[in-house]
Image (spheres, rainbow, N blue to C red):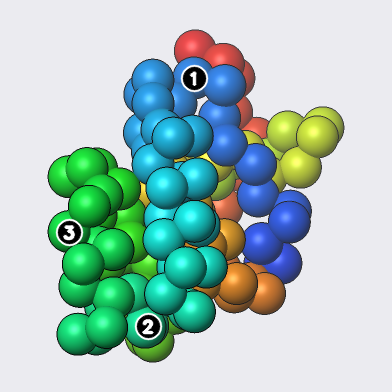
């Protein structure tokens, strides 16, 4: 079953689908949350105007990050073991949301060592 690992031990796969999530969306959410005062403030009435200005990708990421901040990551990230650490196989948006939410750790399903194929 899933186990919890420190967030900094998980790194995105170099093979991840391009731009999921995009760096621009992550930065836009960081900036909007900072302007609102927090992720949760971005989701309430006071932050509605800032949220509405975000493009659809950034808005969806902000909503996911706020949910993760409130409820944690409910679906484990899929990882494999590499000499560098735990490489993410599935869950790139959840990983970004967990970082935006400031989580210390995340649940992972460890698939062990796998070839690049």
Residue 73 image-quadrant placement:
bottom left
Frontmost residue, 79 versus 70: 70
Asked if residue 33 lies left or right of residue 53, the reply is: right
Rendering coords of residue 43 (x, y %):
26, 78
Seen as rendered, the residue at the extreme right is: 83
Name the residue rendered at 50%, 45% in the picture.
27
Earlier residue among tags 2 and 1: 1
Rendering coords of residue 117 (x, y %):
49, 12
Secondary structure of the residue carrying numbered label 2: helix
Circles 2 and 3 in contact, beta carbons < 8 Å: no
Q: Nearer the viewer, mark 2 or mark 3?
A: 3
Mark 3 sits on what residue?
Answer: 52
Rendering coords of residue 11 (x, y %):
65, 41
Secondary structure of the residue carrying numbered label 1: loop
C-alpha gap between disc 2 and disc 3: 15 Å
C-alpha gap between disc 1 and disc 3: 31 Å
Mark 2 surroundings within 10 Å by alpha-carbon count, few (fewer than 14), some (14 through 19), many (20 or more): some
Circles 2 and 1 in contact, beta carbons < 8 Å: no
Query: Up-down: is 73 above or below 40?
Result: above
Frontmost residue, 99 versus 32: 32
Mark 1 sits on what residue?
Answer: 15
Mark 1 surroundings within 10 Å by alpha-carbon count, few (fewer than 14), some (14 through 19), many (20 or more): few
State whether residue 107 appears in this view. Answer: no
Earlier residue among tags 2 and 3: 2
Disc number for residue 40 = 2
Residue 4 image-quadrant placement:
bottom right
Asked if residue 9 lies left or right of residue 71, the reply is: right
Seen as rendered, the residue at the extreme top is: 117
Name the residue rendered at 57%, 61% in the picture.
99
């Amino acid at each position: 079953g899933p186990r919890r690992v420190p967030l900094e031990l998980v790194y995105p796969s170099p093979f991840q689908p391009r731009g999921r999530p995009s760096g621009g969306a992550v930065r836009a959410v960081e900036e909007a949350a900072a302007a609102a005062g927090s992720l949760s403030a971005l989701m309430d009435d006071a932050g509605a105007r800032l949220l509405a200005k975000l493009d659809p990708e950034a808005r969806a990421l902000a909503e996911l990050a706020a949910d993760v901040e409130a409820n944690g990551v409910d679906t484990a990230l899929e990882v494999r073991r590499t000499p560098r650490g735990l490489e993410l196989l599935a869950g790139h948006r959840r990983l970004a949301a967990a970082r935006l939410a400031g989580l210390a750790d995340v649940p992972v399903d460890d698939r062990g060592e796998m070839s690049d194929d």
